[in-house]
Image: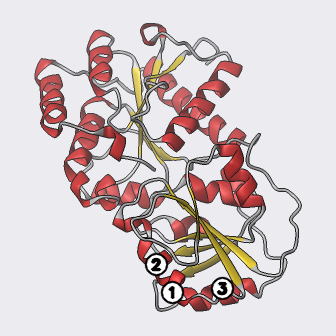
Amino acid sequence: MSHMKINILFDFNSIRAPWKSSKFLRDLRNFFEQEDVYTTIPDKADVILFYNHYCIEEVIKIKRLYPNKIFIHKIDGPLKFIDNKNDKLDDLIFTANHLVADGTVFQSEWSKIKCFEQGLSSSPIDTVILNAPDPAIFFKKEKNISRKKKIISVCYAPFINKGIDILAFLDEKLDFNKFEITYVGDSPVTFKHIRLLRGLTDTEWAEELWSHDFFLAPSLDDPCPVSLAEAFKCGLPAIVRDSGAYPEILGASGLLFNGTEDVLSKINTLSGQNGLASENEALYDFDLVSHSYLSFMAGVYSDAAEDHYWPKKINFLKSAKLKKIRKSLLLNENEFLE
């Protein structure tokens, strides 16, 4: 494996890509550089990592020029569960995976199952690797005890499935003599009681997490949000919606709720459990996650080198099919955030 070289085919300078996903890929690139397995030149790489639909035309070009290179596809989604308009975008991602990917990395078992249900073809080799935040920024810190219990929630894209309905309900019904809520992000709803923050840096976001008591994750069908991992790494227990990958990853670090009918009771229950803290920090250990990526890539590369697996080939007709789907979408990638 010592001579294997990796390239992440992604525009790290683009403002159109999801911020949190860009940050994770940048951290992963830094890890590969430290391990001396990274090259900035795709032509010199043995293994190419690409993400969702980004840089898809360059992915096609490199795959056609170098059919024996290994292509690993990191997939989020399905994106249609974030925004119902994204089913055609899922078609592009699924088609690219079918035609190009030699290995696939899903970010949760739920995401893997739902992608297959929505039409993703079975991948030759796949794995599930959770996202992980930067340990230099997100870590446990001593908390000050406050009179009120402080709840924090975040959303980087105000789609309807991101849980604005729960926040609007809490803004009306929660006892703000006992609780405070901070919401980080944009909201189509004007809040009366909830404190609203926008445009935080990662360092500012970590400072906010340390100053709160627990994290609220109200979104529907979320495949594995980085923000929950960040909250866990900062030691916060969580109240999360019984939807998407949340039940899979919550463990004993908080409580599940269904909707407006039980969110108040779950908040009151969790607030009475003094001393409860996240027990899931190990799940999101960046060193473990980054080594899992490296191990998976090395395994696929080794299988191909030993003729146990033959990398996919993409011809003109296949590449034309992908380009046609890409062109028909007229993508505004700035919409597709975490």
Indicate left or right for 172 with 251 as reference: left
Secondary structure, mark 2, is helix
Quadrant showing the N terminus: top right
Amino acid carrying mark 3 in the image: Phe
Residue at x-position 67% and y-position 15%? 36
Amino acid carrying mark 2 in the image: Ala
Residue at x-position 89% and y-position 61%? 142
N-terminal-most mark, 2 or 3: 2
Q: Which residue is mark 2?
A: 168
Residue at x-position 17% and y-position 39%? 329
- Which label number is shown at residue 176? 3
Q: Residue 44 appears at what percent x and percent y?
A: 47, 7
Indicate left or right for 200 with 126 as reference: right
Picture layout, residue 59 above or below residue 22: above
Q: Which residue is mark 1?
A: 172
Residue at x-position 26% and y-position 34%? 96
Picture layout, residue 243 above or below residue 271: above
Tags 2 and 1 touching, CB below 8 Å: yes
Amino acid carrying mark 1 in the image: Glu
Q: Is residue 285 visible?
A: no
Q: Residues within 10 Å of mark 1 (few under 14, many from 20)?
A: few
Q: Residue 56 appears at what percent x and percent y?
A: 30, 27
Q: Residues within 10 Å of mark 3 (few under 14, many from 20)?
A: some
Label 2 – label 3 distance at C-alpha? 14 Å
